[in-house]
Structures are given as structure tokens and as C-alpha cells.
Image (cartoon, rainbow, N blue to C red):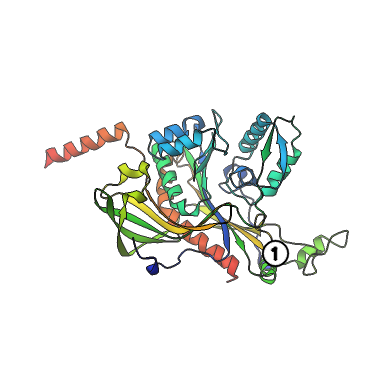
Amino acid sequence: MTPSQVQLVPSIDQANRTQPDSYLRSFGPDASGSTTSIIDPVRELKDQIDALLAQTTGILNAQHDRDLKTFVNELKAPEIRRQEVRSLGSFRLDRTLPLATWEGVVEKRYSSGFLGRLALVDNGITDTSTFKFSEFDLEEVSESDFELVQPGATFYWSIGRRRNEAGTVTNFSFVRFRRLPRMSVVAQRAAVKSIETALAGA
Amino acid sequence: MLPLATLVKVGKMPGKELSGASIVFNGSFNPASLNPTWLADQNLITQESAEYALSPDNPKPLTIIPQLTAFSTDWLSAQINPAQAIIFTDDEAREVELRDFGVGLLSLLPETPVDAMGINFNAHFRIESEEKWHAIGDRFLPKAPWEGVFPEGPWRVRDGGFRVGLRTVTAEVNRDESGPPGAVRMEVAPSLVIEPLGLFCAVNCHFELPRVAGKRANALDFSEILEREWPLAKSMSFEMMESVRGGE
């Protein structure tokens, strides 16, 4: 594309942006730098809040880690505590690389596991043209998900590689269940009433 | 378990070092009520995740005040102010759960006014050669016109003989009437995290629902859009990043 073909577009409505910005890029868990600085926690919190409320946009991202360095260096608060900020250097210290993910439905529940029907999730799109079946042990499920392991429940299974902070690479297989909000009392009553009405009419 | 020999490496972009996903809702929220304990009570996160978010051992920031709630679990972070709710994860394996959390959150607040939503994906790549890295920059920002904007002066000449380099570029397309109102924006920049030869790509799939007869759209409207549009947004983002990275 030549420069003359580049179209100018209106500037994004700042008040209604849903796009990443530098605030959370700087302060998310991935924010990083190679500096050790002195930070007043009260002022730090105030500045973070002011920045968030002023910009009203944000996203986690490690792109602008230099923003954090600037932020840290510009603070001149009294020495209260030290904040260690990790350096990413040329690689991230801890990262997960999923190689494949399936969306599954529980077909049968056993005492020690369950049978799942699996559809491959390819870049966000679930491929329901073919299914695979696999048995899973309950040992592969987090205890907090045990109550969700019921026929018809949706779960996800990912496999991939994980590199820890020391650089060690391990393979992982990760099963977790879809969490949906509890039905409200009002919704429960409405459902019961709906069923009763249907039964009465049958 | 399926034998690993049957698996195909799908969805893996060569050279991708880091990635993240976020969902941003613009509307009217009550930050203090959307705290980890309440979310666990509503079954959106586990009790263990809520306890971790509130734990003093969690190194990530925790703020719960009337104007702002900010917390992080092991995989999910959230920042909610009266005008915006942001949820994000940097664990690519759990992006689909981010969608579930967003849909669930909106379902719990069906009458909450929401005006716009952004489904965002970003990634950092390591490009295999310096030649290709420069070629990507030259493709999205031809240097010659900018050399005239920054004439001779005390400027350092970069590799390739130009003074000017690409800092960031954002392109935007607007949806036509066949889809929900909104736009898709893509940012391309050198990565500040992956050095050297790092490339940063971010895609913002922005959706807006205008007022109808003075009535604002609500969370339920956007929960349906989020559930329906997430796969398309994810797939499109993947293709767009591949196009930028691969030069196709």
C-alpha cells in the first residue's frame, strides 16, 4: 500500500474506547522493568486510581513496561518500602503455551472419573464436525470443580507447554469446567412457575 | 486420554512469545459490589480463587473501594470503575474462560446499562531475522515521507539508512449493516518486551449499541453479543496477526 492509499480515520472517541491503553499495560501482572525503586504505597495507589479514572480504558499487557520504569523513576515519595520489579529481558520468566484445546461435554459420570465428548477448539472456533471421546480421572480435575462434574456439563481440556521462571519446560494437561452464575431466586421461581403452567396445560 | 500422537498443533503461531486477552465493558457499574467474594458466591470464580485474590500473599494489587475494584486471581485480573469494567488474562489456555466469566458477569447484571464492549487480543512475536523485522516495519510505515518531516538534524541514522522508524501504527475498519455496530482496530508496533526483533500486535473488536428511543442498551444485550462474537473475534485476530507477521 502506498502512502496515498492510506486512509485517515476519525480519532477514537476517548470516552468510549474499549481498547488497550498504557495504564494497565504498565500496572498489570506482566508489567516489568529492571529497576528497583522507592515507592510510597499511598501515593502509588492514588496515582493508579487517578490514572484509571482519568483514562477510563485499559488492558493487561506487558508492551509498555518502559512506562512502568518511567512511572517508578518519576516518583519522589519518601522511602517507605522497596518494590522489586522483575526484568523480562529477552524472554518472559514464566509463560504458558497451549498447543491444543478441546471443548467437552460430560457424557457419563463414574465414581472415579467421567466420559467426555470432545470438539476441537481451533482459534476460538469450536469444530463440531467431528467428536472424540475420552475418559478422564477425577484426579485431573480441581477439587473446586468436582460438584460441576455432572452429565451435560461443559468442560475444557488444554494441553501444552509451560516454562517456569528457571527456564524449565514441562508439558501440561489441564481440565476445568465451565462456571455459570447461580440462578437467582427470582429466576428459579419463574422456572418453577413455567414448568407448573406447562404441566397444568398438558 | 487421547494418545498424543493423534494431536495436531493447532492455533500455535510460530514465534509467539506472549499473548493476552481482555474484555472491556463501558457502562455504569458499582465497583465495590463486584468483589471476589461476591463473584465466588455467584459461582463465577472458585472459592479458592477468591481467597487467593484477597490473600496478603498475593503479590498482585488488590483495591476495593467505592470508586474502584481491582483484583487478580491466579489467571484472571479485573479492574472495575463506575464507567468501565475490564477483565483480562495473560494465560492463553484460559482465554475461553475469560469469555465465560464475561458472559456470566453480564448475566448477573442484566439491567446494568452498557454502551460498548471491546474484545481484545494481543501478542508479542519474535521475528526470525532482522531483515524480515525491518520489512514488516517498512510495509506498514513507508519511511520516505517521514524523512521529509524530520529533515537533516542531530538525528541518529538507524539501520537501513533512515532516521525515522515505526513506533506504532493503528488501522481501523467499521462494520457494515450486516453485523453489530462497531469497528475493528489493529495496532502494530515493535515489541518493548521481546528484544531484539520483537513485534507487537493488538486487535480491538469494538461493539457499540446506540440508544433506542433514549433507552440505553444493557448487560444482557452485550452478553449475547459477547457469546456470539467471541469465536469470530478470536479467529479474525489470529488471521490478522498472521497476516502482519507473515507479510501475506
Amino acid type of the residue tagged 1 in the rendering: Leu
| Quadrant of residue B62 within the rendered picture | top right
User: At which x and y percent is residue B86?
Assistant: 53, 42
User: At which x and y percent is residue A104?
Assistant: 33, 55
Q: Residue at x 76, y 65 (%)?
A: B145
Name the element at disc 1.
Answer: loop
Asked if residue A10 shows in the view, the reply is yes
Q: Residue at x 24, y 37 (%)?
A: A191
Q: Quadrant of the N terminus of chain A?
A: bottom right
Residue farthest toward the right in the current orientation of the protein: B153
Q: Chain of mark 1?
A: B
Is residue A168 or residue A155 the one in the foreground? A168
* Residue ID for mark 1: B141
User: At which x and y percent is residue A149?
Assistant: 30, 47
Q: Residue at x 71, y 61 (%)?
A: B166
Asked if residue B29 shows in the view, the reply is no
Q: How many marks?
A: 1
User: At which x and y percent is residue A69?
Assistant: 71, 45
Residue farthest toward the left in the current orientation of the protein: A202
Q: Quadrant of the C terminus of chain A?
A: top left
Q: Residues within 10 Å of mark 1 (few under 14, many from 20)?
A: many
Is A154 on the left or on the right of B185, as rendered?
left
Is A52 on the left or on the right of B141, as rendered?
left
Is residue A148 or residue B225 the one in the foreground? A148
Is residue B79 or residue B54 the one in the foreground? B54
| Quadrant of residue B128 within the rendered picture | bottom right
Is residue B220 or residue B1 the one in the foreground? B1
Is A134 on the left or on the right of B89, as rendered?
left
| Quadrant of residue B157 within the rendered picture | bottom right
